[in-house]
Image (tube, rainbow, N blue to C red):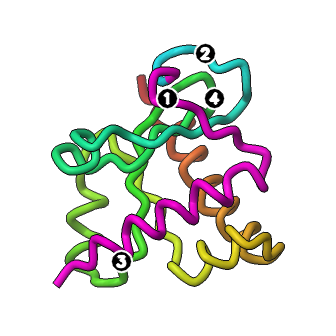
Amino acid sequence: MVNYEFGHQAEEYFLMAAPRLGIPVLDRSQVGKDPGFSFAISRATEHEDFCEGTDFWFYANGEWVRLDLTTARDPEVLSRKENRENVFVVRISGRTLRLAAQGCRQDLIEVLQALQGVINEVCASLRKV
């Protein structure tokens, strides 16, 4: 059974942690535009979340990309998420997100490392084009 309520709480923690990492949280209307920052994040619309598997839009390296934040550990669920095109999966434990939102340095570093993985994937995908 999927716990959607916990997933949404994890997303809230992620949004609380982002500014602590120097990542501005922008309104969805800013997606697709140059935000004037090196990095930025925006919550996806409800339609994008439920129909397209996108929790957030993340701006890095001059591109807006779709993120699916997951706390899942089930290999089948992770495989399904990771095999989608054009959606980058960010795997972070719920505990890490909660503590990062509270400002715990080690957990903020873990969130940053997970986002660095996405940045590396974005750079690799841009090189393929």
Label 1's element?
strand
Dot 3 lies on which element? Answer: loop
Q: Quadrant of residue 25?
A: top right
- Structural crowding at the residue carrying mark 1, measured as other residues with C-alpha within 10 Å and reported as few (<14), some (14–19) or many (≥20): many
Q: Quadrant of the N terminus?
A: bottom left
Query: What is the distance, in whole Å, between disc 1 and disc 2 at their CAs?
Result: 9 Å
User: Residue at point 69% right, 59% down?
Assistant: 112
At x 64% / y 58%, what residue is drawn? 16
Question: Which image quadrant is residue 37 in?
Answer: top right
Residue where numbered disc 4 is placed: 61
Q: Amino acid at mark 4?
A: Asn
- Identity, as a three-letter code, of the amino acid under mark 3: Ala
Q: Give the residue pinned by disc 2.
A: 34
Q: Which residues lie in the magenta part?
A: 1-30
List the residue tagged with mark 1.
64
Magenta stretch encompasses residue 36: no
Compared with residue 123, is residue 79 higher up or lower down, i.e. above or below? below
The numbered mark at residue 72 is 3
Image check: 35 left or right of 85? right
